[in-house]
Image (spheres, rainbow, N blue to C red):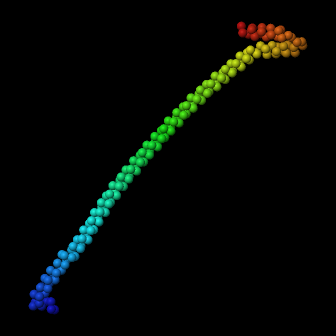
């Protein structure tokens, strides 16, 4: 094998050194900067993505806080509306209750006045009715008509006798 021949070692070492230096220079000047640039771009994209993710996370938290605030405000407003409606209904019910109470008092007073008037009228007419009944009953019992003055005297003696 020619590569193992010791007389060709110096030329092989020379070309090895030249090839190594050329490959080193090519790697140093061309390949490594390209790889470094690619890694730099990748790191910048990752950093940008992390910044965007952090920004979106902050926006999401702001949106969540705004949502929770809106829900709390809505809940408070609904409770206030319910409370106001309850108070209004209670006031209306109390007002209607008072109006009904006044109406019933008026009707009761009016009914009591009518009853009292009817009672007084009935008491006033009781002598007249009793006199007429006495005249009719006596006429049927004894077979003759009695005068109105005789019937009034008989009724008066009975009614005045009961009062004493």
Left or right for 62, reference 86: left
In the image, 7 versus 22, the foreground residue is 22
Q: Residue furthest bottom?
A: 1
In the image, 151 versus 83, the foreground residue is 83
Percent across and percent down for residue 48 are 29, 63
Left or right for 62, reference 39: right
Q: Quadrant of the C terminus?
A: top right
Q: Quadrant of the N terminus?
A: bottom left
In the image, 56 versus 122, the foreground residue is 56
Name the image quarter holding residue 107: top right
Left or right for 14, reference 124: left
Percent across and percent down for residue 30 are 21, 76
Q: Is residue 19 above or below residue 110?
A: below
Percent across and percent down for residue 71 are 42, 48
Percent across and percent down for residue 158 are 77, 10
- Residue at 21% over, 74% down: 32
Q: Is residue 72 above or below residue 128?
A: below
In the image, 126 versus 49, the foreground residue is 49
């Amino acid at each position: 094998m020619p590569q193992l021949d010791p007389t060709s070692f110096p030329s092989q070492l020379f070309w090895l050194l030249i090839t190594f230096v050329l490959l080193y220079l090519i790697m140093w000047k061309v390949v490594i900067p390209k790889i470094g640039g690619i890694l730099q771009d990748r790191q910048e994209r990752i950093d940008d993505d992390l910044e965007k993710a952090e920004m979106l996370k902050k926006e999401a938290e702001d949106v969540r806080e705004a949502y929770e605030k809106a829900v709390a405000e809505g809940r408070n407003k609904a409770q206030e509306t319910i409370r106001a409606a309850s108070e209004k209904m209670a006031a209306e019910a109390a007002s209607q209750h008072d109006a009904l109470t006044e109406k019933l008092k008026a009707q009761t007073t009016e009914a009591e006045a009518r009853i009292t008037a009817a009672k007084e009228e009935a008491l006033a007419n009781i002598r007249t009715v009793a006199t007429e009944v006495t005249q009719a009953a006596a006429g049927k019992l004894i077979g003759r008509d009695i005068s109105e003055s005789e019937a009034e005297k008989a009724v008066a003696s009975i009614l005045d006798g009961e009062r004493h």
